[in-house]
Image (spheres, rainbow, N blue to C red):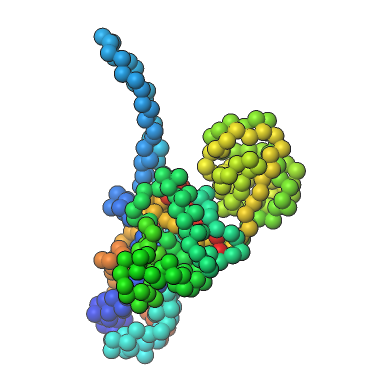
Amino acid sequence: MAGKMVTTSILQTLVAMGLNALRERIVMPRLVNRDYEDMITGAKKGSTVNVAVPAAVAVRSVTPDVVPPATSAVTPTSVPVTLSQWNEAPFIMDDKGINQVDAGILPMQASEAIKSLANTIDQYLWGFYKKFYGYAGVAGTTPFATDVSAYLDARKFANAQLMDPDPRWMLIDEVAEANALGLRAFQDASFRGDTEGIVNGTIGRKLGANWVMTQNVPTHTKGGEDGNYVINNGTIIVGTTTITVDGGTGTILEGDIFTLAGDTQTYVVISTVGGGTVTSITFAPGLKIETVNEYALTFKSGGPQNLLLHREAIAFAMAPLAEQKLLGGEGVSVAIDEESGLSLRLEITRQYKQYQWAWDALYGAAVIRKEYGVRIAG
């Protein structure tokens, strides 16, 4: 019987060994804000928690009087974090594989399935880079080849955007890290704070951020716009987040970064109207200067998107999945990793002379503060 062959100890062995593999392959889930997980009621797809974002409060002068002045109401906004992602990584294992698990040997196929699910979670979180408008570096040029100016520019923009100073993470790909490790700025004791130099091949905390290398840094592919788009409005006031455009052709995609003539602020495209010829763009942040008709839009090229990120930029939540067993031949086990909080369920079902093993995870995330991320082009 399947219930006898697939014992609880085998399940727990594979779950525990799987979490070790998972922990080595992901970065983002360990860095972002996970404080809202306990507020989600129900462990089903679509469950949501609304994260409140406080509204600005105006300051006024005090003038004593017998009648107190009226106080303006404030309307805090909220950002929903929804468990919208439910993924599984299934594979087939024969009885020999079961014996390997029982002997304490993690089958290679199980390791690959765990790796695939882990990377899916990590890449899902990385996809939120498209929401950040802060931008430093030069597209097509790997940063840190000669100095740390790309990071210092990103830090300057982060400070201008009022990003809290701690905790900040500098997430870079393997090519940018190779450049950074060669800089005397990171090797000298005056920067490192010790005399040991780079012994373990990691940069660590430098210049106000924790530097981490990850192979999952995404590459942004910009739209095919022809470089001729201009504003097609009259005078546009500060704070506007949607403009009409004309004069150009080609697609403009979510996550594209652009600047406006006479404005040093970088803006990120949230959405557009029109396909091959775009007629309007919604973007963030709101316009920093007043603009007029025919102001030109200049778009940044694509490439790797290294990221200076604050913990509060993204809220991430995972839900533990049920361990219910409806049939005697089923094997189900759930493990929560105490270090990262990742919750994975392993479900085993007996088929014809073999078992299907399926790891699954239920999770969701949202950008809470667009100001808390700065992209560094590579």
Question: Which residue is the extreme one toward the top?
Answer: 66
Observer-nearest of 82 and 159? 159
Question: How many numbered circles are shown?
Answer: 0
Observer-nearest of 225 and 235? 235
| Quadrant location of the C terminus in the rendered image | bottom right
Q: Quadrant of residue 321?
A: bottom left
Please state the horizontal and vertical placement of residue 361, each as a whole percent of the image: 38, 64
Q: Residue at x 48, y 62 (%)?
A: 148
Q: Is residue 135 left or right of 80 when viewed as pictured? A: right
Q: Quadrant of residue 329?
A: bottom left
Q: Residue at x 32, y 75 (%)?
A: 196
Please state the horizontal and vertical placement of residue 32, each as a whole percent of the image: 37, 57
Q: Residue at x 50, y 64 (%)?
A: 147
Please indicate, yes or no, whether residue 3 appears anywhere in the rendered image: no
Question: Which residue is the extreme one toward the left?
Answer: 9
Q: Quadrant of residue 89?
A: bottom left
Q: Is residue 80 left or right of 250 when viewed as pictured? A: left
In the image, is residue 301 above or below residue 229? below
Q: Residue at x 37, y 90 (%)?
A: 96
Observer-nearest of 137 and 221? 137
Please state the horizontal and vertical placement of residue 77, each as a whole percent of the image: 40, 37
Q: Is residue 40 left or right of 298 when viewed as pictured? A: left
Please indicate, yes or no, whether residue 149 appears anywhere in the rendered image: yes
| Quadrant location of the N terminus in the rendered image | bottom left
Observer-nearest of 42 and 245? 245
